[in-house]
Amino acid sequence: MKKILLKINFIVCLIFLFSYSTTMANEEASYNVVQKNDIYEIRYYSDRLIVQVPNKGDNNSFRKLFKYISGENKNSEKIAMTVPVTQTKKDDQMFMQFYLPSKFNRNTTPIPNNPDLEITTIPEGYFAVIKFSGRSSDKNFDKHNKILKQKLLEDNISIKGFPIRATYNSPFTLPPLRRNESMFSVDWKE
């Protein structure tokens, strides 16, 4: 009887985690797919407003960004979480970035209280993207980043800049259900 109750409890927990993982709905940075193949797709993104912080490889970067959207800004305004959360390199420094909801523009975006945070715009452009599931570990990201880079080189598509790591799910999402991406800004001509 005890084993049956444990199995039922385990199944209920899995159902709860699965439903939580799949029902979290966050605004996603909009894009248009301009080409797609079995390995990657080319997306066109318009300008995107972000808040970013230097990423020193610990949880402090995420925490600083999360505090900002939780109301630690000049307006004490809570801001909806969006996806993806990205990590990229710029000027030999790593950054973690949160995309701001589309209702904001440069004039209406709350100013961060934390001086480490910066509001900026990622300019429009084309990005090559490979999707993968599982954990967004360095090993998993590097593996898919290399696959994408190799395929882009084979297809004679010029890469501009460093790889971008994009994560879409909460840490409570089961690894097989997670959506992660490796991206490169590319020189694309339609």
Image: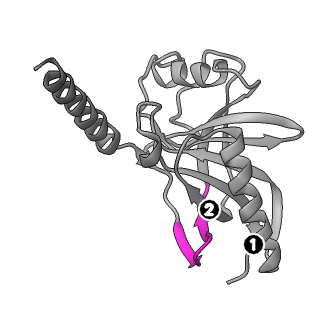
Question: Is residue 177 positioned above or below 34 on the image?
Answer: above
Please tell me the numbered disc located at residue 130.
Answer: 2
Q: Tell me if mark 2 has few (under 14), some (14-19) or many (20+) residues whose alpha carbon lies within 10 angstroms of its own.
A: many
Q: Nearer the viewer, residue 154 or 103?
A: 154
At a point 59% along the width and 50% down the height, the residue shown is: 48
Q: Going from the N terminus, do you reach mark 1 or mark 2 first?
A: 2
Q: Nearer the viewer, residue 67 or 2?
A: 2
Q: How many marks?
A: 2
Q: Amino acid at mark 2?
A: Ile
First to last magenta residue range = 32-47
Q: Report if the CB atoms under discs 1 and 2 are less than 8 Å apart.
A: yes
Q: Tell me if mark 1 has few (under 14), some (14-19) or many (20+) residues whose alpha carbon lies within 10 angstroms of its own.
A: some
Q: Quadrant of the C terminus?
A: bottom right
Q: Residue furthest right?
A: 92
Considering the numbered disc 1 on the image, is that residue within a helix, a strand or a loop?
helix
Question: Is residue 12 positioned above or below 140 on the image?
Answer: above
Q: Position of residue 78 (x, y in %)?
A: 41, 24
